[in-house]
Image (cartoon, rainbow, N blue to C red):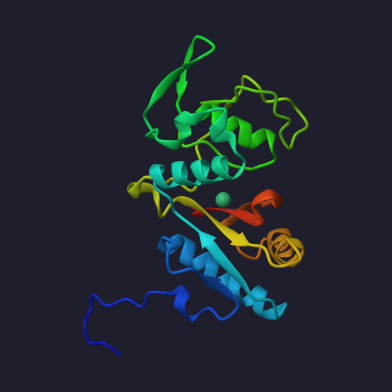
Amino acid sequence: MSSNPNWTPVLSVKNNKFLLVDDSVVVSQLMVGVIVELDKDFEAANHVATIGSGIRTESKQLTIIRNYAIAERIHQEFPAILTCTVDDILQYENEPVFAWQPSWCRLLQKGYKIDPIRPAVVLFDYIGSSGKNLRGHELEASKHIVPDAKVEEYCAFDVRGGANGLEDEAKIIGSVFESARIPELVAFKPEPKQNTIHCDVRRKT
Ligand SMILES: [Zn+2]
């Protein structure tokens, strides 16, 4: 025991044995609480998985969009994605749009479940999970992008799938979600194209 009255025990994801967290992943204490708790469910299922993404900066989100765009050769159609910044604007069909926006929308069409860096309108036909064409609709910025002042209020992390895709991970996370055992885990969304399960976390008030 410490005699320092300011000392408080801090949970750490480093002790997780089944739901591991990549060193590069940025987490808040709110997320740590959920991830430590979720480790028990992965242990009960005797299944090891990894969290590959947590809190991101806007420029990290741009890098993710850029890398997927290059992998899908979208940069051949929209070369601005190779060099643009988060703030860059270009004219697309006589409308000002973010320079990354056309590439992001092509990724949506190709099945990537990826949210924009800033709130942005879907420029092309894209059938969302609701079955509705979201062309012309504004989508919210990624929940991975959290201002410093809000990191203990909400955030998101992604659990990587394994060799057989998302089946095992979706089953474990799905049953935790159904049971509401971890109330801060407010939503989850399989992203098969990226082989990850996106998890939304929100502090209970
Ligand atoms: Zn995610």
Left or right: where 129 falls relative to 68? right
Residue sitting at the far front: 76
Of the pair 180 and 61, the residue shown nearer to us = 61
Q: How many marks?
A: 0
Residue 203 percent location from the top left of the image: 49, 54
Q: Quadrant of residue 29?
A: bottom left
At 58% from the left edge and 69% from the top edge, which residue is drawn?
50
Left or right: where 10 falls relative to 119? left
Left or right: where 150 falls relative to 116? left
Q: Work out whether residue 159 can be spotted.
A: yes
Residue sitting at the far bottom: 1
At 75% from the left edge and 27% from the top edge, which residue is drawn?
132
Residue 14 percent location from the top left of the image: 45, 77
Q: Tell me: residue 126, above or below residue 46.
A: above
Q: Tell me: residue 164, above or below residue 114.
A: below
Residue 139 percent location from the top left of the image: 57, 30
At 48% from the left edge and 48% from the top edge, which residue is drawn?
144
Q: Work out whether residue 119 can be spotted.
A: no
Residue 57 percent location from the top left of the image: 39, 47
At 53% from the left edge and 28% from the top edge, which residue is drawn?
78
Residue sitting at the far top: 94
Q: Quadrant of the N terminus?
A: bottom left
Q: Quadrant of residue 51?
A: bottom right
Of the pair 29 and 16, the residue shown nearer to us = 16
